[in-house]
Image (spheres, rainbow, N blue to C red):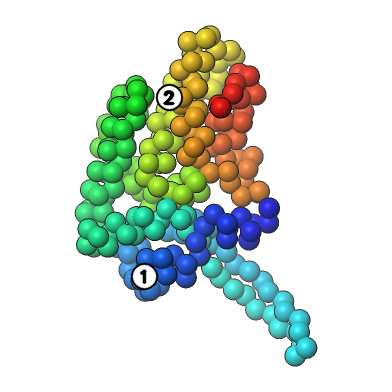
């Protein structure tokens, strides 16, 4: 799939995002300056050469692309009337911890030690990664539920497989690994063609399926 096709299929450009949120580009820029809305996941610079009956025309065009889940985030900002980064972070943290609780209720077992730091410190790290649109590239839609699934799925996989270094897994480990990989499978993006070999999906799903002869169905 061409990069342009991939972006138009899975992302909104600036105009589409603003239309979906009923805001203008100035409002979007203000949100980003206030550190309450993610930066674009992809910034495209196109060199265009147009040939027509009128002759040859060349120009450069620029466009930004945002994951479609950013609409949910923007709608939340509007509904909650959030205008400060501290309030946006609190709103993000509430949704993140609520998603953690849902996973715990579904039987996923994890503790703060898996994060390698206190939960508050981890939330600050994830918030900054959310704002710089790291998760806009890693996940399918940059929804907070997806972000939590990626974070917990990776932590569990790394814990079970000793950072993906174990040569083989026993039956108990395979049983534990399966739901963690299913979490990742439903949340991780597939990546543009030029990124596929370096994506988390390639490292945490494709490579482990081959290494341990797994299925995630």
Q: Position of residue 161 (x, y in %)?
A: 50, 19
In this view of the protein, can residue 152 be seen by the observer?
A: yes
Image point (42%, 70%), residue name: 19
Above or below — where is 79 with respect to 30? above
Image point (23%, 48%), residue name: 90
- Helix, strand or loop for disc 2: helix
C-alpha gap between disc 1 and disc 2 = 40 Å
Above or below — where is 107 with respect to 5? above
Q: Which mark is residue 22?
A: 1
Q: Which mark is residue 102?
A: none
In this view of the protein, can residue 121 be seen by the observer?
A: no
The part of the image, by quadrant, that contains residue 169 is top right
Image point (42%, 28%), residue name: 155
Image point (26%, 54%), residue name: 88
Above or below — where is 213 with respect to 56? above
Q: Residues within 10 Å of mark 2 (few under 14, many from 20)?
A: many
User: How many numbered circles does the render carry?
Assistant: 2
Q: Nearer the viewer, residue 173 or 40?
A: 173
Q: Position of residue 56 (x, y in %)?
A: 75, 84
Residue furthest front in the image: 217
Q: Sequence-wise, which precedes: disc 1 or disc 2?
A: 1
Q: Position of residue 190 (x, y in %)?
A: 58, 43
Tell me the quarter of the image containing the C terminus. top right
Q: Residues within 10 Å of mark 1 (few under 14, many from 20)?
A: few
The part of the image, by quadrant, that contains residue 38 is bottom left
Name the residue tied to disc 2. 156
Q: Are marks 1 and 2 in contact (CB under 8 Å)?
A: no
Which circle, 1 or 2, is nearer the viewer? 1
Q: Position of residue 9 (x, y in %)?
A: 57, 57
- Helix, strand or loop for disc 1: loop
């Amino acid at each position: 799939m061409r990069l342009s096709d991939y972006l138009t299929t899975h992302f909104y450009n600036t105009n589409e995002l603003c239309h979906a949120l009923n805001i203008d580009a100035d409002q979007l820029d203000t949100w980003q300056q206030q550190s309450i809305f993610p930066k674009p996941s992809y910034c495209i610079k196109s060199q265009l050469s147009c040939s027509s009956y009128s002759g040859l025309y060349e120009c450069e065009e620029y466009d930004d692309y945002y994951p479609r889940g950013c609409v949910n985030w923007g709608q939340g900002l509007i509904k909650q009337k959030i205008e400060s980064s501290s309030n946006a972070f609190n709103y993000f943290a509430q949704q993140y911890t609520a998603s953690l609780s849902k996973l715990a209720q579904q039987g996923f077992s994890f503790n703060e030690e898996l994060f390698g730091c206190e939960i508050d410190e981890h939330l600050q790290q994830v918030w900054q990664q959310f704002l710089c649109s790291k998760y806009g590239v890693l996940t399918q839609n940059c929804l907070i539920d997806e972000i939590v699934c990626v974070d917990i799925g990776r932590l569990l996989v790394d814990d079970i497989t000793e950072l993906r270094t174990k040569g083989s897994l026993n039956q108990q480990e395979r049983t534990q690994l399966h739901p963690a990989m299913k979490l990742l499978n439903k949340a991780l993006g597939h990546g543009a063609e030029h990124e596929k070999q370096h994506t988390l999906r390639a490292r945490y799903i494709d490579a482990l399926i081959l290494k341990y002869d797994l299925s995630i169905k």
